[in-house]
Image (cartoon, rainbow, N blue to C red):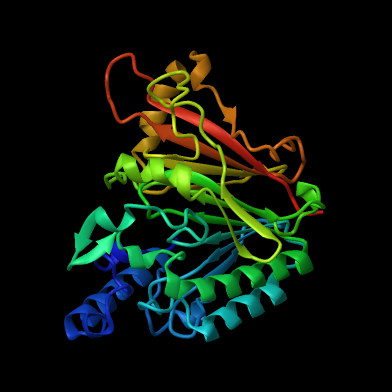
Amino acid sequence: MMWNDHDIFDGAGSYPPLLHKSPIMMGLFEIGQQMRLLFQHHTTPEKARTHRLFGYQGYNFLAQCGPQLALLGADERSECDDKTVHNENTWNIIFEKLDNDLQNVAHLIVLFSVPFSLWRNIPFSEQTNSVFGLPELYDDLLDEWAHEPHMTERTRALCRFQEIAEKKRTRVTFFSGDVHCCGVSRLQTRGEHMPLPSNDSKLMYQIISSVIINRPPPRIIIRAAHYFGTKWYSVVDTEERLIDSFERDPKQAMDSSLNTRVLRKQGFLVIWFWPFIDFLLILFGLDWTFNSNYKKAKSTAIQQSYNESSTISDQNNDFKQEANSLRVKFWLENTEKKKGRQPYANYDLFIPDLK
């Protein structure tokens, strides 16, 4: 598990130094850190290092989930300020552990609380909400990796993830939330001589799941994201873009006017790693009560053709029969609880292992 600013206070770590370092803010942070370590990791600040949490000042983790799947939980709050997300010493520790501990691991899932790859340079984004007089798109505009002071750090980290993927032949995938919508971003090799997806070490997906308790961004922001921020080149020979992911809204079968890259919907992810029976269930913003609700809805949902699982419409996503593909399932919830309305629509994204 990983924490974000709302586990402390809204926008924690992104305020100007005078406010960020104030006694009240630091006191709230220390209490939040203690509660996070206690309830998420069953440890304390004094014992966290002996319980395999690592970092310069923060508490990151690397966990092996079966023989070919690993999770890296990146603590983006403990060292965060208006110019830095992770201390450089923490990045060095992270990549040293990946270099030493990733042995024959097919897939590495990196948990970032804020999306590592999303839209760039969206008009109107600074005019949506305000916290302490600061412009805000999601919890705070300064949180995002695309914020200018964070771009150099992000570029260095991306290059190092590409290096570790190439060296270890491990597919890297990013999971994030925070932005109150859901979508998929893809990074891949840029150029005419693009390798096959299964051979491209730069092929990485950013999976974004919304938070169920927050209002989505204004529609104008989502539309602007589709038209202005869908493709960019932050690293040499690397293309990043939001991909067309969703063709069906839970409210209707097909909608030709639907924004297919990013949806203002509540959602969560289910991840299967084939061919192992064990599966990893990751819920963003949902609690255990979903299980009973889903069982009630399942019998109705499977009778409707448009509520059956669809494959995300990525042009590179033609490898779903690969034995070691990582299967990511999106469930989109219909927020209009009316009789006869389908409660969910779902999509599959298959991410190939790196050969």
Residue 292 visible in image: yes
Q: Quadrant of the C terminus?
A: bottom right
Residue 137 visible in image: no
Question: In the image, 53: left or right of 173?
Answer: left
Which of the 4 image quarters holds residue 342? top left
Which of the 4 image quarters holds residue 329? top right
Query: Residue 257: x percent and y percent?
Result: 44, 26
Using the image as rendered, state which of residue 122 and residue 43 is in the foreground: 122
Query: Residue 205: x percent and y percent?
Result: 60, 51
Q: Residue at x 61, y 68 (%)?
A: 158
Using the image as rendered, state which of residue 68 and residue 130 is in the foreground: 130
Which of the 4 image quarters holds residue 222? top left
Query: Residue 46: x percent and y percent?
Result: 39, 85
Q: Quadrant of the N terminus?
A: bottom left
Q: Residue at x 49, y 54 (%)?
A: 118
Number of dots carrying numbers: 0
Using the image as rendered, state which of residue 16 and residue 46 is in the foreground: 16
Q: Residue at x 54, y 33 (%)?
A: 347
Question: In the image, 87: left or right of 124?
Answer: right
